[in-house]
Image (cartoon, rainbow, N blue to C red):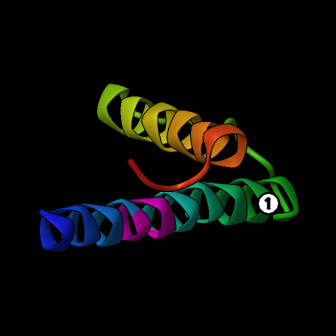
Amino acid sequence: MEIVILIINNILMVLFLLSIFNILKHAVRLAQNFFSDEPTKYELSEKELLVAGLSASYIITCIIKGIGI
């Protein structure tokens, strides 16, 4: 049973890192768009917005609760 918990904890850690990378990707794109010569509106598709929202909520949850079961 301990091996299953260890595997799940590792999967949750990977998801946490992927969430951070996803939020950083959007932050960099937003900054590039903002500081470009001709700034335009930064738009996300519905799918991108959903994934970004889930990533942000998972990061906040991990900060408050911690990573793990």
First to last magenta residue range? 13-17
Percent coordinates x, y for residue 57 in the rendering: 56, 33
**Residue 15 magenta-highlighted:** yes
Instruction: Say if the magenta span includes residue 65.
Output: no
Magenta stretch: dominant SS?
helix
Residue 9, given in percent of the width and then of the height, sits at 34, 64
Of the pair 46 and 41, the residue shown nearer to us: 46
Q: Which residue is rendered at x = 44% and y = 54% of the image? A: 68
Give the farthest residue toward the front. 1
Horizontal side, residue 28 vs residue 34: left or right: left
- Residue ID for mark 1: 31
How would you rate the neighbour count of disc 1 (Cα within 10 Å): few for under 14, some for 14-19, many for 20 or more?
few
Q: Amino acid at mark 1?
A: Ala
Residue 66 placed where, x, y %? 61, 50
Q: Nearer the viewer, residue 7 or 21?
A: 7
Residue drawn where x is 51% and y is 41% of the image = 58
Q: Secondary structure at mark 1?
A: helix
Examine the image and state in which quarter residue 14 appears. Answer: bottom left
- The residue nearer to you, when weighing 35 against 25, is 25
Q: Nearer the viewer, residue 63 or 1?
A: 1
Would residue 2 be found to the left or right of residue 13 on screen? left
